[in-house]
Amino acid sequence: MDSRQGISAALKSGLDLVEVAPMAKPPVCRIMDYGKYRYEQSKRAQEAKKHQKTIQVKEVKFRPKIDEHDFTFKKNHIIRFLREENKVKATVMFRGREVTHAEIGEQILRRLLNELDDIATVERKPKLEGHIMTMILCPKKQSKAATG
């Protein structure tokens, strides 16, 4: 129908003429209560936001001369973070001349990955940046049957 006819029909019914699809040929308009429409849209957006899961990146720091107990303790923290479906940034920090033995830090991260192989995948491989070597782990995707 003509735009003037649409406007007059909307005024008669006490509603608004709202353009729904402006890119269509010809543009599509609808007679509706625009305030109610906007309210319902905001409510739908709030509901969608409520159901989405936010993923955090948790950081666990190691040192090249880490003791066995400390390694196990930190590995258990990483397991907890991965089960909560967070990403984990495993960091090996070198002090002074320790950085000349970067292979020690790489061994620590490789050992961590081998022990967490069943629950974690590598998102970013071990990389040395200055005096810090980092690796990012993310939880493995599990099937619905296994989890529930």
Image (cartoon, rainbow, N blue to C red):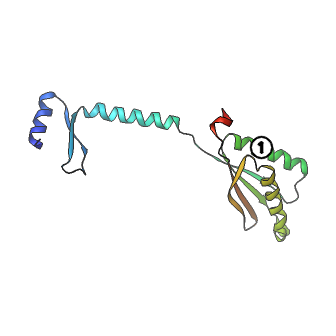
Which residue extends farthest bottom?
100
Q: Position of residue 36 (x, y in %)?
A: 30, 30
Mark 1 neighbour class, 10 Å CA radius: few under 14, some 14 to 19, many 20 or more: some
Q: Position of residue 39 (x, y in %)?
A: 34, 32
Residue sitting at x 9%, y 38%: 5
Looking at the rendering, in which quadrant would you find the C terminus? top right
Residue sitting at x 80%, y 43%: 76
Residue sitting at x 20%, y 41%: 29
Q: Position of residue 80 (x, y in %)?
A: 74, 41
Which residue extends farthest top?
13
Residue 84 horizontal side relative to residue 7, left or right: right
Q: Position of residue 28 (x, y in %)?
A: 21, 44
Height in image: 57 above or below 50?
below
Height in image: 52 above or below 24?
above
Mark 1 = which residue? 77
Dot 1 amino acid type: His
Q: Nearer the viewer, residue 41 or 146?
A: 146
Q: Nearer the viewer, residue 73 or 114?
A: 114
Query: Circle 1 — which element?
Result: helix
Q: Residue 79: name its quadrant.
A: top right
